[in-house]
Image: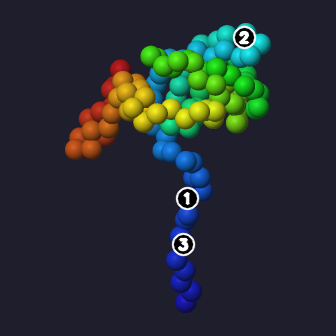
């Protein structure tokens, strides 16, 4: 008889935790191209964006988040109309807390997931 123990190690090497959000944003490139986007997750060091046009890896952008000054970032991966960017200067903790508090998804741990699903 053969027995084995499987241990899965996290490959998440992020410096700060990601927070699921649904937040409007605006992108400006150094070439003055502008577009709106949706921020799908946010951390102190970066964000994942849903865009209406492709953003190639390595593109330097300025990301406007609600109530925050424009933040310089670099696109670190891109897949058609989704991209992730890393901020040149991290957001401060208070900004992350405020943005996630306003735009984050709230989970109610004592309530069954079935009760939270809306049926049309």
Which of the image's four quarters has the C terminus? top left
Q: Label 3 belongs to which residue?
A: 6
Residue 8, quarter of picture: bottom right
Q: Is residue 6 visible?
A: yes
Task: For mark 3, give the secondary structure.
Answer: loop
Q: Is residue 42 visible?
A: no
Image position of 6 (left or right of 72): left
Q: Label 2 belongs to which residue?
A: 33
Q: Nearer the viewer, mark 2 or mark 1?
A: 2
In primary-sequence order, the first of circles 2 and 3 is: 3
Task: For mark 1, give the secondary structure.
Answer: loop
Measuring from the top left, give residue 33's x and y in whole percent: 72, 10
Q: Marks 2/3: CA distance?
A: 49 Å
Measuring from the top left, give residue 92's x and y in whole percent: 46, 33
- The residue closer to the viewer here, 5 or 95, is 95
User: In the rendered structure, are the residues bearing label 2 and label 1 in contact, judged by CB atoms less than 8 Å apart?
Assistant: no
Mark identifier at residue 39: none
Q: Residue at x 27, y 39 (%)?
A: 108
Measuring from the top left, give residue 42's x and y in whole percent: 50, 33
Q: Label 1 belongs to which residue?
A: 10
User: In the rendered structure, are the residues bearing label 2 and label 3 in contact, judged by CB atoms less than 8 Å apart?
Assistant: no
Image coloring type: rainbow
Q: Residue at x 55, y 89 (%)?
A: 1
70 is higher (above) or lower (below) than 18: above
42 is higher (above) or lower (below) than 10: above
Q: Residue at x 56, y 86 (%)?
A: 2
């Amino acid at each position: 008889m053969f027995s084995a123990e499987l241990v899965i190690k996290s490959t998440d090497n992020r410096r700060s935790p990601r927070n699921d959000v649904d937040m409007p944003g605006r992108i400006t490139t150094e070439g003055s191209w502008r577009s709106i986007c949706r921020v799908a997750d946010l951390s102190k060091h970066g964000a994942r964006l849903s865009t209406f046009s492709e953003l190639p890896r390595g593109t330097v952008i300025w990301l406007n988040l609600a109530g925050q000054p424009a933040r310089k970032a670099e696109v670190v991966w891109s897949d058609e109309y989704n991209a992730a960017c890393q901020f040149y200067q991290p957001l401060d903790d208070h900004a992350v807390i405020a943005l996630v508090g306003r735009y984050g998804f709230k989970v109610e741990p004592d309530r069954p997931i079935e009760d939270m699903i809306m049926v049309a």
